[in-house]
Image (cartoon, coloured by chain):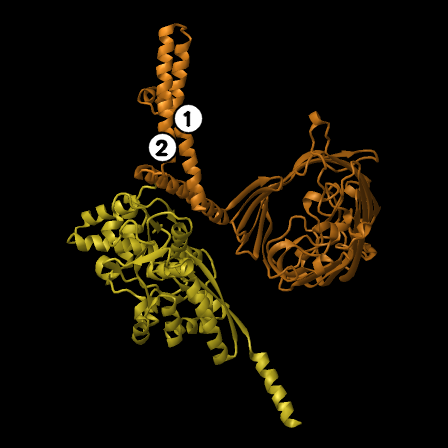
Amino acid sequence: MKTTKLKQLLIATVTGAQVALPAFAADGAATGTNGTAVVESSAASTDGGNSSESAEIKTLKEQVDALVQKVNALEQQPAQPAPDEPTVNLQNLDQQVRILERQREIDRDAAVAKAATTPKITLGANGFSASSADTNFVFSLHGLIQTDSRTFFHADGGTLGKNTFLLRRARPIFTGTVFHDFDFNFTPDFGGSAVQIFDAYLNYRFSPEWQLEAGKFKSPVGLEALQADTWTSFNERSIASDLVPNRDIGLELHGDLFGGIASYAAGVFNGASDYNGTTTTQDVDNSKAFAGRVFFQPWKISDVNFLQGLGFGVAGSYEDDQSSAANLTPGYKTDGQQTLFSYAGNVVANGKHWRISPQGYYYYGPLSLLGEYTISDQQVSRSSGTPASADLQNTAWEISAGWVLTGESASYNGLTPQHSFNPTLGQWGAWQIVARYANLDLDNAAFKGPTTFAAAGSASAAQAWSIGLNWYLNRDVRLNTSYSRTTFNRGGTATPTAATAQPENVLFTRIQLAF
Amino acid sequence: MKKYLILILTLLAAAANAAEVKLLNVSYDPTRELYVDYNAAFAKYWKAKTGDDVNVSQSHGGSGKQAQSVINGLEADVVTLALAYDIDAISTQARLLPADWQKRLPNDSTPYTSTIVFLVRKGNPKGIKDWDDVVKKGVSVVVANPKTSGGARWAYLAAYAYALEKNQHDDAAARNFITKLYKNVPVLDSGARGSTVTFAQRGIGDVLLAWENEAHLALQEFGADKFEIVTPSLSILAEPPVSVVDKNAKRHHTTAVAKAYLEYLYSDVGQEIAAKNFYRPRNATIAEKYAANFSQVKLVTIDQEFGGWTKAQQTHFADGGVFDQIFQPQ
């Protein structure tokens, strides 16, 4: 290796010397050290053409012959060792080359070592993320902003709904990981009249199968309720979600089994009432709620494509409520977020409250289907009036469907347009049409008696259908519009001023940024 | 029949009790070969003593870098580094072991010692015999970066100590001497093994300032016809220390085996293995047995010449210290 390099250097040096030699030889010709230069000089002189020049040429030829003989004689002599100085220079050059090569090696190793410990920062469609090189520590910033409008129509003789623009959700979402196995999420919401903490939890991942989550997060019951706010088909969840809890504070064991074919969640919580849109941060009694869910996607990792997106399961909860009005729903809401049912002022939750919710979805290519059925059985009592207590069983169900007109695959976790919106390139994002029908049936017992458990103006049932068009400009920006009509069955005494006195017709729009 | 049953049950119980224990030894660059030999011996010893299999993983690199890795979370059960300052750093910065860790084992937790010698090319073409020859103009010196390599710090201090001794402890003269030396260094590796590669495999330089064991290893590896060892008139007593990393070992439930692992270094077997790998054993009998492996050289200590590692580190190797002042990358 070393010898080869030295030879290369020698060749380079000798080549350089040969290139330089002709210039240097102009002087050397006089001393006869370079035959070629001498010959060229004589040729130039021949161009003159006289006899004295011929003699001169003859003399020069003799000199050339003499020089040739000398050169030949020199060539016959054994090769002389190169002088010391050039050897030293070559050795120095060789060392310099080796040092440069080694330095490059060291720099490369250092760069690799540095890359292995340099934190990574990414900024893209999924927000901002910084992580340690070993990914044991990750911090991500996401955001969700939804600017809605609701326009109520008076087709059936009047409504109490307010036509409005509203900031439905405005949430910075801080997520991350510490020490590899501990994930966190902190999500405040600035969209309502007061700032609220929606999610604040720590999740320990022992393995995909065994994870323990503590803090405030969604109670594992309703299928549509568990879907991310970013990816629900309509601006508002259906009236079927009125019967399931929203976020709650507690401790939950959960995990995915067999590569995600089955998943489970089981937790103990403070206990949230049906549809607690504002979510609570304080417990109202000493009793605790138990909530759990199992969900199966049998073909999730199979080769049967058309069944990969099929999922079904059942969820439920149980709590023995102590006497407290705060354990009751603040009111079941229509799609337009008007109250369709609430309890009378002196009614409290008192006794068992259980829910059960079979549920399922199916996604295949652009098609999406989602359905769930929920029973919420609540024991209530009141301080005065007859009857003094009741066991009210309310039921609700919904089915929704969607079709992505531009062909992208839909999923429970949203969809990504094949081509982001870019009119100059003729790209228009993804378009999806959606439809939904939902039914909510309140227990008739709530409306019986001299004094009813239901507040005046409450509906005993509601049916809502909706259609909508969703435009996904890109992964982060989405525009929605939908129309929803809800009809009501009158419960107790007619209340002409109640929202339930006439069907609700409402047009929604939404501009959403989610990253 | 009953006897067979008892025998089977006994064997089953023994099998159930046997366990595989895993240890991570985070060490410095040139100890690879030493701990390959030692780990095998210890595993045999531990198996005989407890019935457990022990599997020791090794991690090697510049001593300073290795210490930083442990501070940053490398889960070492034991550290066997080039110098005490690096283990002190693990104690003070990460609090993974107590500040008095060095008192827990004999000889200040240094089961073997070494020193710095010169490795030169066969025939010693530059006639390098002592430190004065190393600083001569035109001599190319290979040594690692003392900011990351423990061996390089020992080499730096050996040269500095020589200059102090020669110049009646005139620090300015010593600084001038060390400046000249590092002017002759064309490339700095991050660890001692890297500088051996630079010198022996890449053919760079006239002299390698090497751990004594590393120099002997180079002779074995590349052949005595290519290199020779030159022992200077004065060098430094390098004392590579060892310690259990208490909090890691406790978390891994390996405290007992980690302690035994280091204690066994002081056993006759451990000392023999150290000597065979050209580390100077603490055991006088074994040191005498292998005396031929080690040249006689006047050795100064870090404490007597530099006031201990903390002071030496602050003065010479901390950011802005003497080394930063005198070394200009070429």
Q: Looking at the picture, tell me which residue is in the foreground, A250 or A25.
A: A25
Residue A350 percent coordinates (x, y): 70, 62
Up-down: is B230 above or below B177?
below
SS state under label 1:
helix
In the picture of the structure, the residue carrying the numbered disc 1 is A19
SS state under label 2:
helix
> Neighbour class for label 2 at 10 Å: few (<14), some, many (≥20)?
few
Of labels 1 and 2, the one closer to you = 2
Q: Looking at the picture, tell me which residue is in the foreground, A195 or A423.
A: A423
In the picture of the structure, the residue carrying the numbered disc 2 is A74
Amino acid, disc 2: Leu
What is the distance, in whole Å, between disc 1 and disc 2 at their CAs? Answer: 22 Å
For marks 1 and 2 on the same chain, the one whose residue lies earlier in the sequence: 1
Up-down: is A351 above or below A477?
below
Amino acid, disc 1: Val
Q: Is residue A493 shown to the viewer in this render?
A: no
Chain drawn orange, letter? A
Q: Chain of mark 2?
A: A
Q: Judge left or right: residue A41 versus residue A376.
A: left
State the quadrant of the C terminus of chain A.
top right
Chain drawn yellow, letter? B
Q: Is residue B161 shown to the viewer in this render?
A: yes
Q: Looking at the picture, tell me which residue is in the foreground, A481 or A477.
A: A477
Q: Quadrant of residue A313?
A: bottom right
Residue A414 percent coordinates (x, y): 71, 44
* Residue at image coords 57%, 57%: A181
Q: Looking at the picture, tell me which residue is in the foreground, A191 or A112.
A: A112
